[in-house]
């Protein structure tokens, strides 16, 4: 009897990969590993280039460093359990381990959303008030923004773990993905999950929901400023400085919206689709962000080529 009670107090969770394709996990894990390796190498390269090039010690690149660091954190948080499932068929994860992974996945996701908003603010100031750019975005202001971004994410997600701990679970619970997400954990409860569900919704509204609205407002103001510029060449030049950021925003929000839509309306969709979209949501932004900024940002691209040529010599 005590063993059963312990199992209820400390439930076990089973992660899920691509059901029905277990015999091909070795092959499936190969592109996942390549995505992970590329994203880690790309983000480390971005951080290294910005750190070692004094000419890149500017607000825009400080925000880019925050984005790269966040992407590294997101990748590092999700990949251990993914590889344990795909490489070793080890699906079991403890309740506390699941809560820790869930916490950091959502923290880094909220931080990334806020960093993208900060980068939009950076572009807004650069286009609307170029002469005051350095005076507005001082080092102290950037540090304050970074602390506010991190503090908000840590504070918003922190209560979710305690709310989940108060719920009751079966001794063994099967999750939908090879990692732990809040919306997936609350589906496994056998007690009322109303409070946790409402709190989770409020976290989304107060973080990514608010950020997306402010992002849209920022680009409305940017577009209005650009259209007021008389010279067509200057308009194109101003818009080109936003291309990389727009790509990063689309890369982050498109998979997130797709995953949310499947959760809400795709009950009849194949489990493969759910797992695939969740993997895209967590793996694609850390992969694409360094590629986009390396290709579209001339200063980053030139420094990378310079470092590469120095290595060849």
Image: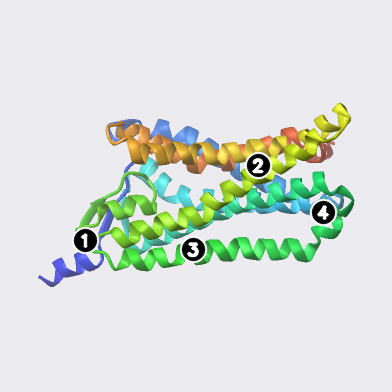
First in sequence: mark 4 or mark 3?
A: 4
Instruction: Tell me: residue 107, above or below residue 219.
Output: below
Residue 266 location (% of width, % of height):
33, 34
Q: Are marks 3 and 1 in contact (CB under 8 Å)?
A: no
In which quadrant will I find the N terminus? Answer: bottom left
Taking the image as shown, residue 23 lies to the left or right of residue 277, namely left
First in sequence: mark 2 or mark 1?
A: 2
Q: Are marks 4 and 3 in contact (CB under 8 Å)?
A: no
Answer whether residue 54 is visible to the viewer in this image: yes
Residue 147 location (% of width, % of height):
65, 65
Residue 220: which disc? none
Return the residue found at the far top: 232
SS of the residue under disc 1:
loop
Residue 126 location (% of width, % of height):
81, 47
Q: Are marks 2 and 1 in contact (CB under 8 Å)?
A: no
Q: Residue at x 31, y 31 (%)?
A: 269
Please give the residue where the numbered disc 3 appears in the rendered image: 156
Viewer-nearest of discs 2 and 1: 1
Tell me the CA gap for discs 2 and 1.
Answer: 44 Å
How many tags in the picture?
A: 4
Please give the residue where the numbered disc 1 appears in the rendered image: 191
SS of the residue under disc 2:
helix
First in sequence: mark 3 or mark 1?
A: 3
Residue 42: which disc? 2
Q: Residue at x 28, y 59 (%)?
A: 193
SS of the residue under disc 3:
helix
Q: Nearer the viewer, residue 33 or 135?
A: 135
Tell me the CA gap for discs 3 and 2.
Answer: 29 Å
Q: Residue at x 75, y 63 (%)?
A: 141
Please give the residue where the numbered disc 4 appears in the rendered image: 57
In which quadrant will I find the C terminus? Answer: top right
């Amino acid at each position: 009897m005590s063993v059963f009670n312990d199992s209820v107090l400390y439930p076990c969770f089973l992660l899920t990969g691509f059901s029905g394709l277990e015999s091909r996990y070795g092959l499936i894990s190969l592109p996942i590993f390549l995505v992970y390796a590329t994203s880690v190498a790309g983000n480390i390269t971005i951080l290294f280039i910005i750190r070692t090039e004094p000419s890149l010690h500017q607000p825009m690149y400080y925000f880019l460093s925050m984005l790269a660091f966040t992407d590294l954190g997101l990748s590092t948080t999700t990949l251990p359990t993914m590889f344990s499932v795909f490489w070793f068929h080890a699906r079991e994860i403890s309740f506390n381990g699941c809560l820790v992974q869930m916490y950091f996945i959502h923290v880094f996701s909220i931080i990334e959303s806020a960093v993208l908003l900060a980068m939009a603010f950076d572009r807004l100031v650069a286009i609307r008030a170029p002469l005051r750019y350095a005076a507005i975005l001082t080092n102290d202001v950037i540090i304050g923004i970074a602390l506010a971004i991190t503090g908000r994410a840590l504070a918003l997600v922190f209560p979710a773990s305690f709310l989940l701990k108060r719920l009751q679970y079966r001794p063994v619970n099967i999750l939908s993905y090879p990692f732990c997400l809040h919306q997936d954990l609350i589906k496994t409860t056998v007690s009322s999950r109303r409070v946790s569900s409402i709190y989770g919704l409020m976290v989304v509204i107060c973080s990514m929901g608010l950020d997306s609205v402010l992002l849209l407002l920022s680009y409305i103001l940017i577009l209005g400023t650009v259209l007021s510029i008389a010279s067509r060449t200057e308009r194109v030049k101003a818009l080109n400085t936003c291309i990389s950021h727009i790509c990063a925003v689309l890369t982050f929000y498109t998979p997130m919206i797709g995953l949310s839509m499947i959760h809400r309306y795709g009950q009849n969709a194949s489990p493969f689709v759910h797992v695939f979209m969740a993997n895209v949501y967590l793996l694609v932004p850390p992969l694409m962000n360094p590629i986009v900024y390396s290709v579209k940002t001339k200063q980053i691209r030139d420094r990378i080529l310079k470092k590469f040529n120095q290595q060849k010599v």
